[in-house]
Image (cartoon, helix red, strand yellow):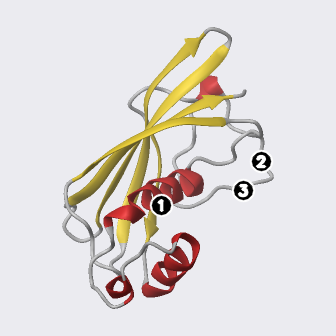
Amino acid sequence: MTIPPTTSAQDLTASPLTFDMFHVNERIGTHILTIDHAMMKLWKDLYGNCPEDCLVDTTVPMGTVPLLLMQAFATIVVPRPPGNLHVGQSCIIHAMPEIGKPLNATVDCASKEKKGTRNLISFRTHISDTETGYLFVSGITKVFWTL
């Protein structure tokens, strides 16, 4: 059984995705996301370490990379079963996108394996320019998957 491709969040009332539904190197879904000035203000209010110019600058601050990766993951990889455990994340930053620019986010299954009695899945996320395809950020999110 494979995961049906998505272009946006799936119905959260559907049955949760299971470990067996993921296949290595298979696309899980895509989503267009945008980091705008309102989101930058929320980020600054939450973390307090955003330089004042991040609210008027044209480039997304580097500190928002985990936000981009997790927003893509949380939007695309649904519905998730309760009890999953996020156990790691890494990323490569090629360049930072402009604030307000639409970004194409894709999530694939990079790998999956049994670790004792646990199911470990590594999700590969790419954040790129919707017009040119230029890759801004790529990352791996590791999750112990409960089902």
Compared across the picture, whether 123 is left or right of 127 comes to: right
The residue under label 2 is 14
Counting residues from the N terminus, which is met first, the one under dot 1 or under dot 3? Answer: 3
Q: What amino acid type should be assigned to the residue bearing mark 2?
A: Ala
Pointer 3 local density, CA inside 10 Å: few below 14, some 14–19, many at least 20: few
Instruction: Write the residue at 35% across / 68% down.
Output: 103
Counting residues from the N terminus, which is met first, the one under dot 2 or under dot 1? Answer: 2
Q: Residue furthest top?
A: 116
Q: Are marks 2 and 3 in contact (CB under 8 Å)?
A: yes
Q: What amino acid type should be assigned to the residue bearing mark 1?
A: Leu
Instruction: Write the residue at 37% across / 86% down.
Output: 52
Pick the quarter of the image with the N terminus.
top right
Answer whether residue 112 is visible to the viewer in this image. yes
Pointer 1 local density, CA inside 10 Å: few below 14, some 14–19, many at least 20: few
The residue under label 1 is 67
Asked if 73 appears above or below 96 in the picture, the reply is above
Q: Position of residue 81 (x, y in %)?
A: 74, 39
Asked if 57 appears above or below 34 in the picture, the reply is below
Asked if 67 appears above or below 113 in the picture, the reply is below
Q: Position of residue 60 (x, y in %)?
A: 33, 73
Compared across the picture, whether 73 is left or right of 132 comes to: right
Q: Position of residue 25 (x, y in %)?
A: 38, 31
Instruction: Give the SS element for disc 1.
Output: helix
